Image (cartoon, grey):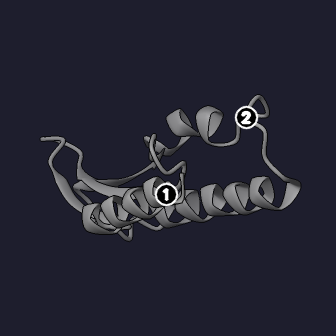
């Protein structure tokens, strides 16, 4: 299961965050772990949790275990690009 690989990065105390954001991220991590155990992504797939480098927002991916092919991603690439664009406009 790939979720644990991202746990350290995702809930790293070295990144300055408010307690609320850290609690939300831990809750998301636990939710993804629960979904992975329930195999909601299908028998041949796994859930992967990552942090988008630009937006610092969580990304959940459904990936084929054998091929590594991305099946689906939440939020989608389009939503991530929109968030990046909005962030750039605020600078």
- Counting from the top left corner in percent of width and height, residue 17 is at 78, 46
Kindly identify the residue that appears in the image at 65 percent across and 58 percent down.
Answer: 30
Find residue 59 and report its image quarter: bottom left
Q: In the image, is 42 to the left or to the right of 37?
A: left
Of 38 and 86, the residue lying toward us = 86
Location of mark 2 (residue): 15
Q: Is residue 52 above or below residue 40?
A: above
Which residue does the image show at 44% across and 43% down from the upper left? 1
- Front position among marks 2 and 1: 1
Residue 74 in picture, x, y percent from top left: 37, 66
Q: Reading the chain from its start, which is encountered first: label 2 or label 1?
A: 2
- Name which residue lies at 18% across and 41% down: 68
Task: Looking at the picture, tell me which residue is in the foreground, 16 or 84.
Answer: 84
Q: Quadrant of residue 60?
A: bottom left
74, above or below 12, in the image: below
Q: Is residue 88 left or right of residue 91?
A: left
Mark 1: give few (<14), some (14-19) or many (20+) Cα within 10 Å: few
Residue 79 location in percent, x, y?
34, 69
How far apart are the alpha carbons under marks 2 and 1? 19 Å
Q: Is residue 52 left or right of residue 27?
A: left
Judging from the image, what secondary structure is the residue with disc 1 in? helix
Residue placed under numbered mark 1 in the picture: 87
- Identify the element where label 2 is drawn: loop
Badge 2 vs badge 1, beta-carbon distance below 8 Å: no
């Amino acid at each position: 299961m790939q979720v644990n690989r991202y746990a350290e990065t995702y809930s790293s105390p070295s990144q300055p965050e408010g307690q609320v954001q850290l609690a939300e991220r831990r809750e998301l991590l636990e939710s993804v772990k629960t979904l992975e155990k329930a195999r909601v992504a299908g028998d041949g797939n796994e859930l992967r949790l990552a942090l988008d480098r630009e937006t610092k927002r969580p990304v959940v991916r459904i990936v084929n275990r054998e091929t590594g092919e991305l099946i689906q991603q939440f939020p989608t690439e389009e939503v991530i690009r929109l968030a990046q664009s909005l962030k750039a406009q605020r600078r």
